[in-house]
Image (cartoon, rainbow, N blue to C red):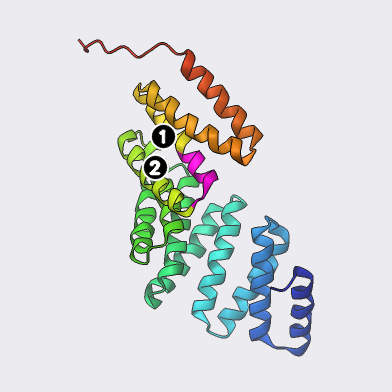
Amino acid sequence: MHSMERMSELLSEARQQGDETRMANLAFKLGDTHREKGDFQQALPLLEEACALCRKHHNTFGEAVVSLSLAELHLAAGHAEQAEILCKSAYHTCLTADDKKNRVRASLLLGDIHWSREDPQKALLPYQEALEICSTFEDALGCGILLDRIAKMHRLLGQDEKAFMYFQEALKRWERLGVEDRQAMTFTNLGDLSKKKGDLAQAISWHEQALAIYRRLKDLRATAAVEQELESLRAAPPASHDPEP
């Protein structure tokens, strides 16, 4: 893989040669690298250049892929409206081309846009669509991410039983993949839901499993937070089981 400095050099060469296909490819790769590093100012002009070149040469699929990166960039910068315009356009291109991988990416991003607007109900539909597609080609990581997102939306809607179920399904994927940090985060979410339900013993058990992972990962901040929560749970009076009047 080229370093960012080398990609910049290659892009300059392509511009001098007037090779617009190569320019689009390199501008996208370099811009996307800057996007992943969170550098909005560097990423934006490069991705816009790549998008414009794809459009000029009627490369609708290339334009869709670049548009998704631009949409993610705008969403991260708080520009949800611009992100949605780009994402919807890319989604329809991917749908027409039957590109399932990028359709998942577009649906996930649309859900994130609705989440950023604090509309969990509206976010559920694209998340569920993406999950259905991911399940068809057994993408365990993608399914785990989407199950986690869906769980969080149900939790925001106060649908704790559904949230609990989806967190458990996400946990199965993290355990299969051996992704310990995500396992730990899911344990804490399950612990919080158990606490809300009044099942303190189960809440303690979930948090203890999270704590063991955080200690193993040497994540001091997360370890301290879970230790504090466990101290609070152990000090709490047992839940009353008196029948409701």
Residue 129 included in the magenta stretch of the image: no
Residue 24 position, x and y percent, is: 64, 79
| 1 is higher (above) or lower (below) than 57 | above
Q: Which residue is mark 1?
A: 190
The crowding category of the residue bearing disc 2, from other C-alpha atoms within 10 Å (few below 14, some 14 to 19, many at least 20), is many
Residue 171 position, x and y percent, is: 42, 45
| 232 is higher (above) or lower (below) than 51 | above
Residue at 40% over, 77% down: 97
239, 213: nearer the viewer: 213
Residue at 48% over, 63% down: 87
Please tell me whether mark 2 sits on a helix, a strand or a loop. Answer: helix
125, 175: nearer the viewer: 175
Residue at 37% over, 13% down: 238
Q: Gap between marks 2 and 1, in whole Å?
A: 7 Å
Q: Are marks 2 and 1 in contact (CB under 8 Å)?
A: yes
Q: In which quadrant of the rendered image does the C terminus lie?
A: top left
Looking at marks 2 and 1 on the same chain, the residue that comes earlier in the sequence is marked by 2
What are the residue bounds of the magenta stretch? 178-186
8, 120: nearer the viewer: 8
Residue type, label 2: Phe
| 208 is higher (above) or lower (below) than 43 | above
Q: Which residue is mark 2?
A: 167
Please tell me whether mark 1 sits on a helix, a strand or a loop. Answer: helix
Residue at 46% over, 63% down: 106
**Can you tell which mark lies on residue 97?**
none
